[in-house]
Amino acid sequence: MVKFIFIDHFWGIQLDGATGQLLHIERRNSDIIENIHDGSILDYYFGTTDEQIKLVYTSVMGLALFTFTITGFWLWYGPKRMRKKTINNM
């Protein structure tokens, strides 16, 4: 089996490697979902080179995740620390 995936479209073709017979034509929905998930669908529609939008999108999302992790930890740990301080001061 030989599989061809089109770069410009979300379609794939499967051929028999020995006979060249067409086995399957499919719309690759998983590629569409992946492109939406990682932001590269915007690069596809705007025609940007070097995936600039994807790079900015993933950088912003990574920084947001890091920020939410740090602030979430602080919101969890802060009240415990304050309670411990008030108990020790009594």
Image (cartoon, rainbow, N blue to C red):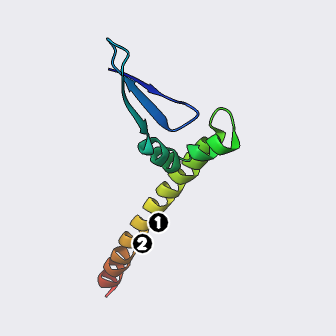
Q: Name the spot of residue 19 as percent of width and height, x first.
A: 33, 13
Query: Which residue is label 1 attached to?
Result: 71
* Tally of marks: 2
Query: Which residue is label 2 attached to?
Result: 75
Q: Name the spot of residue 6 as percent of width and height, x first.
A: 52, 30
Quadrant in the rendering for residue 14: top left
* Image mark for residue 60: none
Closer-to-camera residue (16/90)? 16
- Left or right of 32 in this view: 23: left
Answer above or below: position of 2 versus 68: above
Helix, strand or loop at mark 2: helix
Answer above or below: position of 16 versus 39: above
What residue is at 46 percent from the left and 41 percent from the top? 31
Amino acid at dot 1: Thr
- Left or right of 74 in this view: 39: right
Quadrant in the rendering for residue 4: top left
- Neighbor class of circle 2 (other Cα within 10 Å; few <14, some 14-19, many 20+) is few
Quarter of the C terminus within the rendering: bottom left
What residue is at 59 percent from the left and 33 percent from the top? 8
Answer above or below: position of 24 versus 72: above
Helix, strand or loop at mark 1: helix
Amino acid at dot 2: Leu
- Left or right of 39 in this view: 31: left
Answer whether labels 2 and 1 touch (C-beta < 8 Å).
yes
Closer-to-camera residue (79/17)? 17
What residue is at 42 percent from the left and 67 percent from the top? 72
Distance from disc 2 to disc 1, alpha carbons, whole Å, reads 6 Å
- Left or right of 65 in this view: 77: left
Quarter of the N terminus within the rendering: top left
